[in-house]
Image (cartoon, rainbow, N blue to C red):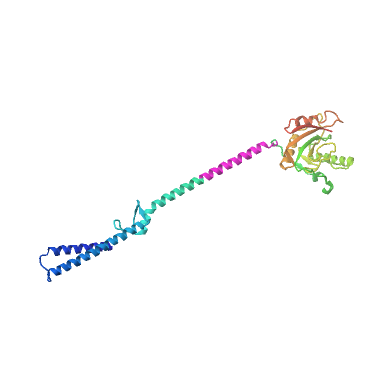
């Protein structure tokens, strides 16, 4: 604004000098007065011209120091060529495109990073699923059991206090071996008859040896399992091996020439599967039969005819 006023004043002085030169009428004081006025006007002209030059220099210096720039040229808050502008409006107009581009760039980077993380998590989940599947495939699983496991607990057929049935526990939590043999007794086809036979076996063992029933479990002709010494107690056969890592399963009946019914085989499989499920039997267990040299060679031949085809069958133990 100051430059504009100075320029108008200089123009007025120049016009006045021109009119003075063209005026033919002399001043009242003559040539000496004209010379004095001319010098005065000349000095004023030089003074205002120097002021205008200084103002322009200061304005140029401010433009060089102004941080607001566009296309490589510096602009002050008040630019002579562009006119007067409001600083807030100038900043908003000039910086808005840059802010939008930066926001779009940040959003793109965030989206890419999120997709990368999700992809890594997906691959990690797939890897875990494959690893678990391969691990399960390596573990020997028992056969599918369609027959339900039904356990008749010891307190159902044994009416004496539990304290009187205290026996030596197995040293290993999960047993490794299973021995199957027949009881060489009558068969039973309902729970009442099977309980009567189990009680008879208990009484015979007590009367002959002063011990409890030697079997860990017994399989009845009714398709049920009767608990003897259970999963965590040593069996009672002194002539059978594996006292600390073996459970003995007795099949109620005599099966030299007669094969057990399908329901009895199904219940044996259900018992083995339940033992694995309860972590009382190793999934890699070994299955054995018994050969007694003191009796006929065909002892329990029909019982083992099918069991010998099972996957965990390992052969006979001799007593």
The residue sitting at the bottom extreme is 29
Q: Would residue 279 be found to the left or right of residue 94 on screen?
A: right
Q: Is residue 155 magenta?
A: no
Q: Main secondary structure of the magenta part?
A: helix
Image spot of residue 115 (x, y percent): 51, 44
Look at the image and tell me whether residue 119 can be seen.
yes
Image spot of residue 290 (x, y percent): 81, 33
The residue sitting at the right extreme is 208
Task: Please report the residue visible at 47 percent of the width from the left and 47 percent of the height from the top.
Answer: 109
Task: Please report the residue visible at 74 percent of the width from the left and 38 percent of the height from the top.
Answer: 272
Task: Please report the residue visible at 50 percent of the width from the left and 46 percent of the height from the top.
Answer: 113
Q: Is residue 123 magenta?
A: yes
Look at the image and tell me whether residue 84 can be seen.
no
Task: Please report the residue visible at 27 percent of the width from the left and 60 percent of the height from the top.
Answer: 53
- Check the picture and name the quadrant holding the N terminus: bottom left
In front here: 21 or 237?
21
Q: Would residue 85 be found to the left or right of residue 8 on screen?
A: right
Q: Magenta segment, which residues?
A: 115-142
**Occupied quadrant, residue 268:** top right
Image spot of residue 313 (x, y percent): 75, 32
């Amino acid at each position: 604004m100051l430059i504009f006023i100075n320029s108008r004043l200089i123009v007025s002085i120049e016009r006045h000098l021109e009119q003075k030169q063209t005026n033919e009428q002399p001043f009242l004081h003559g040539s000496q007065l004209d010379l004095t006025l001319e010098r005065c006007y000349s000095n004023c002209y030089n003074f205002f011209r120097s002021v205008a030059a200084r103002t322009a220099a200061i304005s140029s210096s401010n433009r060089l120091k102004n941080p607001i720039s566009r296309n490589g040229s510096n602009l002050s808050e008040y630019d002579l060529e562009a006119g007067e502008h409001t600083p807030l409006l100038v900043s908003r107009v000039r910086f808005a495109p840059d802010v939008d581009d930066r926001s779009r760039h940040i959003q793109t980077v965030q989206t890419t990073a999120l997709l990368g993380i999700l992809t890594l998590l997906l691959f990690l989940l797939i890897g875990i699923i494959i690893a678990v599947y391969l691990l399960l495939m390596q573990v020997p699983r028992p056969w599918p059991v369609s027959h339900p496991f039904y356990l008749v607990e010891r307190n159902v057929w044994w009416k004496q206090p539990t304290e009187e049935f205290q026996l030596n526990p197995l040293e290993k939590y999960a047993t490794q071996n299973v021995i199957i043999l027949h009881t060489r007794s009558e068969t039973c086809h309902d729970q009442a008859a099977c309980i009567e036979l189990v009680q008879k076996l208990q009484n015979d063992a007590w009367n002959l040896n002063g011990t409890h029933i030697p079997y860990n479990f017994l399989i009845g002709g009714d398709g049920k399992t009767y608990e003897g010494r259970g999963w965590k107690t040593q069996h009672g056969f002194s002539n059978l091996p594996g006292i600390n890592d073996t459970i003995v399963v007795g099949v109620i009946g005599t099966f030299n020439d007669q094969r057990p019914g399908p329901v009895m085989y199904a219940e044996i499989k259900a018992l083995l599967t339940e033992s694995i499920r309860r972590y009382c039997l190793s999934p890699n267990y070994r299955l054995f039969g018994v050969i007694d040299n003191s009796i006929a060679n065909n002892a329990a031949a029909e019982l083992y005819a099918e069991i010998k085809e099972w996957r965990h069958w390992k052969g006979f133990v001799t007593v």
